[in-house]
Amino acid sequence: MHEVVQDYYGKQLQSTEDLKTSACCDVSNMPSWLKPLLANIHDEVLSRYYGCGLVCPALLEGCRILDLGCGSGRDVYALAQLVGSTGHVVGVDMTDEQLAIAKQHQDYHVDKFGYDNVTFLKGYIEKLDELNLDPNSFDIIVSNCVINLSPDKAAVMASVQRLLKPGGEFYFSDVYADRRIPQQLINDPVLYGECLSGALYWKDFERLARHADFLDPRLVEDRPLEITDPLLAAKIGDIQFFSATYRLFKIATLEDACEDHGQAVIYRGTIDQLPHHFNLDKHHAIETGRVFPVCGNTFRMLKESRFAKHFDFIGDDSRHYGIFAGCGDILPFGNQANIVSDSNVGQSVNSGSCC
């Protein structure tokens, strides 16, 4: 599979125009604040972008970030601007052609940004231990439509857990399916290269995350994928695919369910670009100044991460009131209920409290 992916992304694809599905390169929900950052990135780097989501979470200044499967470096160079001169971004990729483009334009971006804060490494995301990266050394790890291409996703998740600092975050976009993919489709090199047949069944992803001690995966956003090539669509049949962004926190005290301890938070509105709402995930659009009831896990995610200073915290976990109503096991994608608009953020957010 490594050879299939290296050939597809190194030789078969020359630009985003060569893709056969809508799995990658959707920009319809791009926030307004990101557009000037992308305008600073070299055109050739942008033309080789094959991501499926936005992996630029809030509050990145000074952070140390690792990008798994960085490709030609679009996300690395966007994140480099967000972390600033005091932060650093490391990109890892296994495809020589993609890394060559990323490194070729490194000086261009140093001139644009006024500082040099990126490093590109050749390696396999399943074998990050071979790159001499220190454990507990990254504030955030990101990935954009790459985990599905890995033949050993469990090894990737284990390495992410090892490399994140306590309270750190794995924030990544990928492709998921509503069922397990048949082996004959997994063996199809085009379907695999197009980020479809390597996609995990969403429940298997949740099991994989929890096995790696990410006990409460949080879905940030999702969209259905359209298979625009008729030949590929015929092979896929009734399988539904979704592009989805998740965030996973490295917090040892998280539980495997949303338990109610009578806790709440108040968002202070002090994060740049988020004056009115803080969007932890698809079900937590926390309005500025409002007392917002949360489960114990959400309480810990906010209090034990880089977001803590932007919130006031009410209560503790000394009492237990059962599980939050509505926490279940239905397909999480595509539920667009209770949408409110935040023009300052440039995206849609969900109102309401926990789960």
Image: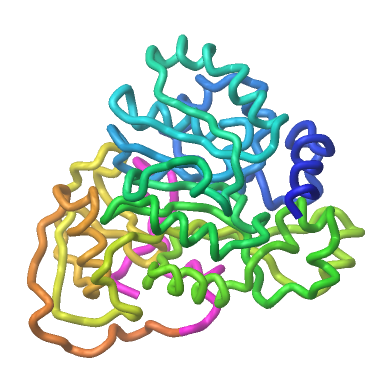
Tell whether position 349 is magenta: yes
Residue farthest along the bottom direction in this orientation: 322
| Residue 70, percent from left and from top | 57, 38
Foreground of the two, 219 or 188 = 188
Colour mapping used in the image: rainbow
Residue 94 location, quadrant:
top right
Extent of the magenta region: 329-355
Q: How many marks?
A: 0
Instruction: Check the image and report above or below for 228 versus 83.
Output: below
Residue farthest along the right direction in this orientation: 231
Q: For the point 15% across and 87% down, which residue is it?
A: 320
Instruction: Check the image and report above or below for 225 versus 132.
Output: below
| Residue 30, percent from left and from top | 51, 41
Instruction: Check the image and report above or below for 36 versus 284.
Output: above
Q: For the point 35% across and 79% down, which residue is it?
A: 256
Where's the N terminus, which quadrant? Answer: bottom right
Where's the C terminus, which quadrant? Answer: bottom left
Residue farthest along the top direction in this orientation: 111
Foreground of the two, 182 or 15 = 182
Tell whether position 216 is magenta: no
| Residue 202, percent from left and from top | 58, 72
Q: For the point 37% across and 44% down, which residue is it?
A: 134
Foreground of the two, 346 or 221 = 221
Most frequent secondary structure within the magenta stretch: loop
